Every structure is written in C-alpha cells, then in structure tokens.
Image: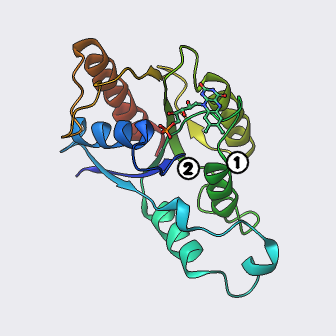
Amino acid sequence: MAIKVAVLVGSFRKDSINQQLAKALGKLGAGKFDFQILKIEELPFYNQDIDSGNPPAAAVKFRQDVAAADAVLIVTPEYNRSVPGVLANAIEWGSRPYGQGPILGKTGALIGASIGKIGTAVAQAHLRGAFGFLDMKVMGQPEAYITVTPGLFDANNDVTDASVKDFLSGFLAKFEAWVAKNK
Ligand code: FNR
C-alpha cells in the first residue's frame, strides 16, 4: 500500500518553486507514495484562546490529516535565514494540545527549494531543532537543498534536469526506507 504523506509547503504563492518541487516529488513517487499537500495557509495564526474548547475547523482538519498520515514531508523556502511564518504556524497547530499534538513523534523528512546556492539550509537546521523537541523521527540524509533555475520544473511538474531528477528519486527511495523503518 502507498505511504500516506502529509506534505507541508512553506509557500503558497501561485508560482512557488517549493509548490512545484512538492508536486514534482508527488509525481516521481507516484505508486509508492500518496502525497497530500495540506492547505496550511487556511490555518489562522496560532492562539491558545481560539484553541481551547472548540478549535477552528481548519485546525481540526489539519490535525486529522497529519494524524492520518504515515509521515510528514516538509518542502520549504527559507525566509530571512529561518522558517517562513506560514510553516511555523502550521507546526504550532500540529504540536498542540500539549503532549497530544499529531506532529509529536511523527516520522518525517525535509527538503527545500531556493534560487540561491545555500538556500534553505539554515531554515532546515532551525526546523530540525524544533523537530527534535517534538520527538520527531526526521531523516538525516540525504540533506536536500535544491537550487532552482528557470525551467527546472515544466508545466506538467516534471523535472527537466536528469541529475536533479536522479537526486530526487534517491531522496524518495531513502524516504521510503526511512518510513518503513521508523513509522
Ligand atoms: C526570501 N528568499 C530567501 N532565500 C534564501 O535562500 N534565503 C533567505 O533567507 C531568503 N529570505 C527571504 C525572505 C523573504 C521574506 C522572501 C519573500 C524571500 C528568497 C526565496 O528563496 C525565494 O523568494 C523563493 O522563490 C521562495 O520560495 P517560493 O515561494 O518560490 O516557494
């Protein structure tokens, strides 16, 4: 059965290279993985006041989707050498209620796309700190910092560069083994 993956993308703009990367991964991994890109942009800002008693519908759905997944995949840009707010916010929702948030202990992996050479390395390092605190089992290698040049992804979400495609296929093969071992 396909591995069910909740995909959290740290950008939701129309032409996001991280959305493109997430879709390209979904296509490359078809058959082995069932990728679901969650609509984290629909989550309100985390606030304990609105999370007590009767949390917003978007948060209830988000928590159900994360709980139902075998693993979480983060696909994110780096903002100001750190984590984009929309993604940090989703992780906050996933980490609560205290001691019971669906992201606690979850198996996962990280990848990110940038137009710069070292883009997303610092953001991913910050995320690893949070994920350690959340007892998550996050794949260590391969580290995946994808430098995106124009045309790397075509209109069908296919990867046009053979070496990048090979790297992404290897990343998914390792992720498949990682989930099987750590789920
Ligand atoms: C950026 N960008 C950026 N890139 C990077 O490699 N390191 C960084 O620290 C930052 N900081 C940053 C802050 C803000 C507010 C913005 C809007 C952008 C550039 C970023 O990598 C680029 O815009 C990507 O295209 C964003 O990803 P999406 O939206 O295309 O997925």
User: Front-most of 123 and 180?
Assistant: 123
At 45% from the left edge and 19% from the top edge, which residue is drawn? 147
**Label 2 neighbour load within 10 Å: few <14, some 14-19, many 20+:** many
The residue at which mark 2 appears reads as 106
At 43% from the left edge and 33% from the top edge, which residue is drawn? 178
Callout 1 secondary element: loop
At 54% from the left edge and 68% from the top edge, which residue is drawn? 42
Q: Is residue 104 visible?
A: no
- Residue 171: image location, x then y, percent: 37, 25
Q: Amino acid at mark 2?
A: Lys
| Res 60 quadrant in image | bottom right
- Residue 116: image location, x then y, percent: 54, 18
| Res 149 quadrant in image | top left
Q: Amino acid at mark 1?
A: Leu
Give the answer, above or below, for where 170 lies relative to 66: above
Whichever of labels 1 and 2 marks the residue nearer the N terminus, that label is: 2
Q: Is residue 181 left or right of residue 58?
A: left
Q: Quadrant of ligand 1?
A: top right
- Residue 167: image location, x then y, percent: 33, 18
Tell how many labels: 2
Callout 2 secondary element: loop
**Label 1 neighbour load within 10 Å: few <14, some 14-19, many 20+:** some
Asked whether mark 1 and ligand 1 are closer than 8 Å, the reply comes as no
The residue at which mark 1 appears reads as 134
Numbered badge on residue 85: none
Give the answer, above or below, for where 171 lies relative to 180: above
At 33% from the left edge and 31% from the top edge, which residue is drawn? 172
Give the answer, above or below, for where 40 lies relative to 161: below
- Residue 75: image location, x then y, percent: 48, 39
Q: Is residue 112 visible?
A: yes
Q: Mark 1 and mark 2 in contact? Answer it, CB < 8 Å.
A: yes
